[in-house]
Amino acid sequence: MNAVESITWIVLFVLTTVTVTGVVGRIGWSAPVALVAVGGIVSFVPGIPQVTVEPDLILYGILPPLLFAAAIRTSVIDVRARRDSILLLSVGLVAFTVVVVGFATYLLVPAITLAAAFAFAAVVAPTDAIAVTAIAGRLGLPRRVVTILEGESLLNDATALVALNASIAAIVAVVTPADIATDFVIAVVAGVAVGLGVGWLVSLVRSRLRSPVLDTSLILIIPFAAFLLAEVVRGSGVLAVVIAGLFLGFRAPTVASAEARVAERVNWKTIQFLLENAVFLFIGLNLSGILAEAIETGPGVWPTVLICAGILLTLVVSRFAWVMATTLLYRKGPRRLRERSWAWGNGVAVASAGVRGVVTLAAVFLLPPETPDREYLQFLAFVVVVASLVGGLALPWVVRRLHLPAPSLNQELTERRLLMAEARAAGIRRLEQEATPGDEQRIVDQLRADAVFLGETLEIYGPDASIPQLESKLRLRRAMLDSERTAVLEARREGRYQEPAIMAALQAIDAEETALKAQIPQQD
């Protein structure tokens, strides 16, 4: 395939992804399920070339930006508040799943080794961050449940891939439990250290950049740099990317310009959309090839049906067992845990949200050629992803039956208004400090009267407005916005408002500052 053909296929790939996602979004269908279905149908069309991707491209090229895009938008405050619950799911549940599903796979799949069974279990253990976030946001779940699901799906990838690496090592060589434990500790410690180091260093650099273009260019390479650096020192690249993303997302309001933050949000949402949905389409396009190899190497149709049913049942039961045991521990355990307990309905909602996605399909291609029944295990992983995506369509029905209390929109709106009122008061105080006798009084009066937004400056003063007038308003309003942002961040540190109100206020301030700066381009 020459360069022109490659570019043509890439363009068709993106166009198909955008078109299918847009169409199914209008009618309320699941975009991942639709993309897998479209890709699967196309894969059987004569003349369509079989799509193959190198495992290293998936590991080093697709996973880092996907994880970083999810991490940079995740609230560190919320994750820290629910860290015990998130760790029980992202570490404890993954380890439990690897053991239970690993032994089940070893018993169900003929002629497979225990190491290969554990490797497969590690592949299907993590839930998908993007799919879970989309489902949780659409269902109106309690804020605590949403935080736990997002934190779990973000951090469990690292645990699963560490377990996968250990299993792969056992496939190609002889390893001891001590070797596995040592590698796990090194991977976690080195991954966290690299993530924090990269996050701190990039924050330091960003605080000195004045060009949004340079800032954006820098931030786009960070997930790849963090991943590669962690791998060099035997750390978890996935964990390094996640930690760096969380750190930079938290530090962005204090080290990056408003324009850079606005661009960052749009850029990473776009990257995440294209990569995530393109991978689901890629999954479908592999269906004919995976199915052919599974038929050739598998034990037969009906044994395969029974094997798929057994693995899916084991995945569901193991997740429910762990989550319900955790819920019981919080409700009946020590007082410190009882104070942080959640209702049984919340536990059922968390247990039901076991959607698998991109990480599972990416990880299964990392199985080495020495893996027994490698193609058959890839087919089983495909079945797990598709079945969990289809099963996720029943989540709205489950949530409705649970009658969980939805987040109070009125309370969130009230919090946003109270927080913005505090921010405006801080801005007005800054206005009084910054105003000088050289500033026109009508500019000061207008800014004092309306600290939210005064409209387009050129519309207020007309085309004959002098540059000093515009510069004066821009300088004063920027100073006010700086104090408003400081007030919001202070409220976050004190924990007086929920994170949705904090993020909404920061985004509103960023949007206004960006609009103001655009009015006088020569100031850049």
Image: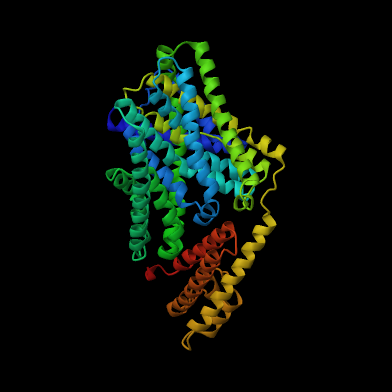
* The C terminus - image quarter: bottom left
Q: Is residue 54 visible?
A: no
Residue 241 position in % (x across, y down): 38, 47
Can you tell which quarter of the image residue 237 is in? top left
Can you tell which quarter of the image residue 475 is in? bottom left
Which colour assignment does the render follow?
rainbow
In the image, taking residue 195 as reference, residue 76 lies left or right, namely right
Say how many tags the image has: 0
Task: In the rendered view, tell whether residue 42 sits above or below residue 96.
Answer: above
Residue 171 position in % (x across, y down): 33, 26
Q: Is residue 437 visible?
A: yes
Residue displayed at 52% across by 20% down: 308
Residue 78 position in % (x across, y down): 54, 54
* The N terminus - image quarter: top left
Task: In the rendered view, tell whether residue 162 sits above or below residue 369.
Answer: below
Comparing 109 with 49, the one in front is: 109
Comparing 110 with 264, the one in front is: 110
In the image, taking residue 393 as reference, residue 293 lies left or right, namely left
In the image, taking residue 361 as reference, residue 318 lies left or right, namely right
Residue displayed at 50% across by 31% down: 35
Residue displayed at 54% across by 85% down: 441
Task: In the rendered view, tell whether residue 133 sits above or below residue 75.
Answer: above
